[in-house]
Image (tube, rainbow, N blue to C red):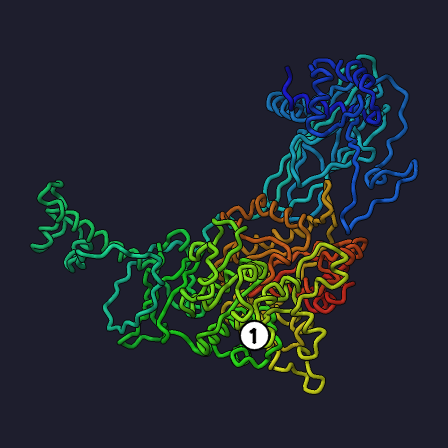
Amino acid sequence: MPSLMHSLESGLDFIEFLGDRTSITSKNELRDIYNLEFKGREGIKDPNFSNIVYALLKFNKAYKRQGNIYINVRPQVRVYCDQWRRPRAPQQPGATRGPQMSAEISAPPPVPSAPVTAVLTPKKKLATEILQKLKVSRKVLTADKGGIEITSDPVASSGKVQFSTDRLRELFIIRFHIVNKGTNCIHFTYYTALHKIRCFTLEDERRVTRACPVFLCPGESYDVSVRYMLNHYGFFPATMYFEFCPDLAESVPFCIVREMEAVARTPLAVELGPVAPYKPFQVVTYRPVNTVIVEGVPPESSVVQHLKTTLKLGDYKYPVYLKELDLLGVTSSLNKCHILSRSLLNCSLKMKNYSHRFHLLLHLEEIQMEVDIRKYDLHNQTMTQDQSNSKLLRLRVPGVAENRPSVLRGDCLRVSKSEDTVPPITVYNGYVHRVELDSVKLGFSKNMFNRQLENNPEQHAAVQRIVAGSSKPAPHLVFGPPGTGKTITLVEAMNQVSRADPSARILACAPSNSACDLLCERLMVHMDPHKVYRLYASSREPNSDNLICYAFVFPEKKTLMKYTIIVTTMVTAGRLVSGGIPVSHFTHVFVDEGGQAVEPECVIAIAGLLNPSKGQLVLAGDPKQLGPILRSPFALQSGLGLSLLERLMKHNQLYQKSTDSGHFDTRFVTKLLRNYRSHPAILKIPNELFYENELQVFADQWDRESYCNWEYLPKKGFPVIFHGVMGKDEREANSPSFFNVSEIEVLVDYLTKLMETQGKKGLPKLSPKDIGIITPYRKQVEKIQKALKSAPALRRWSDMKELKVGSVEEFQGQERKIIMVSTVRSSINYVKMDKDFNIGFLSNEKRFNVAMTRARSLLIVVGNPVILNKDPTWENPLQQYVDPEWKNEH
C-alpha cells in the first residue's frame, strides 16, 4: 500500500494534470480521467484513485460534499461579528474571482496535434532521480537531443552557466533560448529547478506546465528566464530540468539539463584572516603599592540562616615561599621549605601526608588563579550609573557571560581611578549585585558617586509638591516624556511621603505586571522591604519571572492594612475594594504609565479606595505616546482610547499651559525635561514635534556618542540613518498583514555591518540584546525573525533570540542602544486602509513618537520616503534624514 505522502504527491500532480478541468466535481468522471489518462503512464506506478482522494482530503487540498469532490475549493459560511469588516457584495455572474485570476496570463489557443502523454514524476522524486543520474551520466543529460538545442546568455560551458559578482542585491538574468532544429514538431511540456534556493525566480511568457505545454514547430523557439538576486556572499548552484515530448504517437518524453552557478565573492583572505596580530600574553610583575581601601556595599543575603555556627573556620593563607616554588618550578635548587614542598609533591598519597599534600596542592592552585585572574584586568574603563538602581554602577566586562572571567553575585572587584597614581592609592571595593550578558552591577561606597547625577530640579520639585499635597483634592500629573525618569520620580515621591508621614498608606498601580514589578524593585532599594507588599492576581502564573522575592498570596484584610505600600495592577486593585479595605485607608494613590490605560481601568484603583476630599492622586505618563490598545472601532470613535491622563491635559484648564505665561501651573502639573536616554540627533525631531523643543539632553556622553564615528553613517557625528527603499507591500495565504522583503534585506545588511564592526575602531562590543527592531505589522515581525535565523552572516551571534523584534506597542517603555525601524508601507493604495484601521506609522503621531524615541546611540529607519513624505508627521524628519543623492535619483 502506498504511503500517505506518496499518495499526496501523486494527487498534487493529478491536480496539475487536470489544468482547466479542476472544475469537474463528479467523482466518477474524475476517476475515469485518472485511470485512463493519468495513471496509464509508462514506467510509473501510481496509487489507486481512492488513495489519492483520501490524501487530498486529509491535507485539505480537496473537499467532499454530497458525493462530489471539489478540488482546491472549500465552501464557507461566514458570520460577520467583526466590527472592522463587512460582508462583500455578491459578485455578478461571470465576474473575476480573486486577484490571482485577473493577473494570470491566458494560455495560448491549443494547437491541433496528437495527444501528449507526459511522464509526470512527483517533484521530489524527479529531483532525486535526475541529480543521481547527473553524477553518472552528466554528458548524456546535458547534451542537446531530439532536435532541441538550448543555448543561454551568458553562454554555457559544458552544460554549465556560470557568473560571479562582487555586489549584492544586483539583478542578474540568465536567458535560456530553446530552438527546435529538428524536422518534427515538439511539445515543450515542463521545466523546473531541482534546487530550491530563494535567490532566483523562473519566468516564461506562457507559463509552461504539463497541462499547458508549448508547441514548437521546426525552426520555432521559446525563452525561459532565470532572475538571480544575491543577498549574501556565497556559492549558489542550481540545476534546470527541461522536459520535451515529440508530437508522434507513442513517443517517449526526453529531458535536457543545464547547470547554473552563481557566486558572490569577497576577498576570502581578508574575511578569514586574523582581526589583529597575535600577541602572546605578557606576564606582568606587579609591585606592591600602598593603598587605602574603601569598602563597598554588598548585596543583601537571600539566605535565611537558622543553622548557628559553633565551629569557626580559620583563614588559611598560602605561605609566601610557595610563590617562589610556583615561579621557579619543582626541579630548581631551593631552600629547605622548598625541598620539603617538592618532596611532598613527588611522594604518593598516604594517610600521614593526606592533609599536608592537599593543603599544598590547593595553595598552588590558588596562587595560579591569582596570576590568571590578572589577565582580565581592565584599564581606563568608564562605569555608568544603573538606570534601575541609582546606587549601583554598571561596568562592562567582555566575556563575563562565558565565564571569562567567572564573576558571581557577592564577588568583590577592586577599582581605582585612572588618574590616581601617587601612593597611597585609593582602592574602592565594589561588590557584585547582578551579572548580566556583558556587564556587572557593582555596589560602591557613597564616596564613589558623583552627586550631580541626582541633581534634577524638575524631579525634585515634583516630589516636593506631591509630599506637600499642593494639588489636593485635584490629581497631580507628572508629564514624563521619553527617558525623563518619571518612574524614578514616583518612587522617590513615595519614599518621601512615607518618611514625612509614617501613618501614610500608599497604593501604587500600573496597567501591566511588568510595570508593577519595576515599581516594586525600585521601591525595595530605598525602603524597608517589610513595608512593601506586591499583590498579584490569582490568574498570574506562579512560575512567572520576578515572583521569587515576593509572596504570591492574598493576605487577610488586617494584614494588608499594615503595609505602608501595596503594589498591584489597576485591575487587581479592585480586589482590595471587594476585600473590604475602607475608603479612608489609602492616603495616596500613585498610577504609573497612566497614559496606557483606559479611563475605567484607571478608575478601578481610585473608586472605593481613595477619599475624594483628603486623598492625593498622582498620575504619571506621557499623553504624546501610545494610549490603550482597543479593538472596537465604535469604542475608539467614542473616546475610550483617551486615557484619564490625556483627557485631563486636553480638556481641563488646570492641566493646560497658561495663555499668559506659557507654562503649566506647577501645583497641578510637573513636566520633566531632562532626557537621560538619547543622543541629541535622535531626540531632535520628537522634541520639536511633540515637546515644544523643551527637552534637554542629559544622557551619558560615552553611551550616547558610542556610534557617532561609525563608518557607515552618512554624516559623521549624526547617528541617525534613513535608508530609502523602493520595496513592495506583500501579503500571503490568509493573513491580512503586510510584509516587505526589500526592507528586511536592508535590515539584515545593517545587522551584519554592526556585527562585523563591533569592538573595532573605538566601537563598543554588542550583543543582540542591545538591538531592537520595530515594525508596525505582525507579518513583517515574523518575516524578520525568520530572516535572523536563516541569514548566514548572523549565525555567529549564537544568542540572536535575545534580539527583540516587535510592534511599537511592545517597545513602549523600553529602550535599546540601537533601534531599527521598518515602516513596510511602499504602496499608496494601502495608505487609506492604514488610516481607517489605525495601523502602520502613517497618520499616527503617537506611534511615530514611540518608535523614534527608543534608541540611545543609533537609530536606523528603513522605508519608502515617497510614501512617507505624504504624511505631515514624516515630512520634517525626511527633509533632515534622507540622503540628497537618494532624493535626486528618485
The amino acid on which the numbered mark 1 sits, given as a three-letter code, is Gly
Image coordinates of residue 588 in percent, x first then y, are 53, 72
Q: Which residue lies furthest to the bottom in this view?
A: 660
- Please state, as top left, top right, bottom left or bottom right, where the N terminus lies in the image: top right
Image coordinates of residue 116 in percent, x first then y, are 82, 19
Q: Is residue 93 above or below residue 143?
A: below
Image coordinates of residue 834 in percent, x first then y, are 76, 56
Residue 509 seen: yes
| Residue receiving disc 1 | 615
Q: Residue at x 54, y 58 (%)?
A: 513
Q: Nearer the viewer, residue 236 or 158?
A: 236
Q: What element carries label 1?
A: loop
Q: Is residue 174 above or below residue 297?
A: above
Does residue 578 appear left or right of residue 300 in this picture?
right
Q: Residues within 10 Å of mark 1 (few under 14, many from 20)?
A: many
Residue 393 seen: no
Q: Residue at x 62, y 24 (%)?
A: 128
- Please state, as top left, top right, bottom left or bottom right, where the C terminus lies in the image: bottom right
Q: In this view, does 297 lie above or below 578?
A: below
Q: Quadrant of residue 335?
A: bottom left
